[in-house]
Image: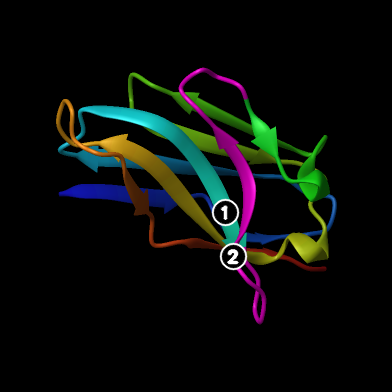
Amino acid sequence: QVQLVESGGGLVQPGGSLTLSCAASGSIFTINAMGWYRQAPGKQRELVANIPNTGNTNYADSVKGRFTISRDNAKNMVYLQMNGLKPEDTAVYYCNAALRVLRGSPLGIYWGQGTQVTVSS
């Protein structure tokens, strides 16, 4: 069993900052990419940022320069530092990981349960 558990969401004023954390646990052989997605009410889930095990990062245009993704491979964790938050960043944020549970097994995609981020005055 593999679990991804997010933490760090909450209510913040426009211009404020939050840091999201996600811990992957369970039967994990290796993690390829980790990332963050978000889904606002009435909208499709969208990629916010991801970071493969090469370390190269990818960001949605809407968050470039404001959000920073990082990971700790030793702890199987991924983080999302969010600065300059805007009301349009309000959404449920989901952690995502592409990983193998055994050597040679196919890559599986796993999701966390989501954490709410609300940006409002």
Q: Position of residue 91 (x, y in %)?
A: 64, 66
- Magenta residues (range): 39-56
Residue 41 horizontal/vertical position (percent): 64, 79
Count of marks placed on residues:
2
x and y, in percent, of residue 64 in the image: 80, 38
Q: Which residue is mark 1?
A: 37
Q: SS for tag 1?
A: strand
Which residue type carries mark 2? Answer: Arg
Q: Which residue matches tag 2?
A: 45
Image vertical order of residue 114 relative to residue 101, above or below: below
| Relative to 83, 1 lies left or right | left
Secondary structure of residue under mark 2: loop
Front position in the image: 27 or 6:
27
Residue 68 in magenta stretch:
no
**N-term mark: 2 or 1:** 1
Tell me the number on the disc at residue 99: none
Query: Does the magenta stretch mainly form a helix, a strand or a loop?
Result: loop
Amino acid type indicated by mark 1: Tyr
Whether residue 45 is situated above or below residue 70 in the rendered picture: below
The residue sitting at 33% across, 19% down in the picture is 74
Residue sitting at x 63%, y 41%:
49
Looking at the rendering, which quadrant does residue 89 occupy? bottom right
Judging depth in this view, the residue of 105 and 83 nearest the camera is 105
What's the distance in space between the residues labelled 2 and 1, CA to CA? 6 Å
Q: Are circles 2 and 1 on residues that touch, CB within 8 Å?
A: yes
- In the image, 21 versus 69, the foreground residue is 69
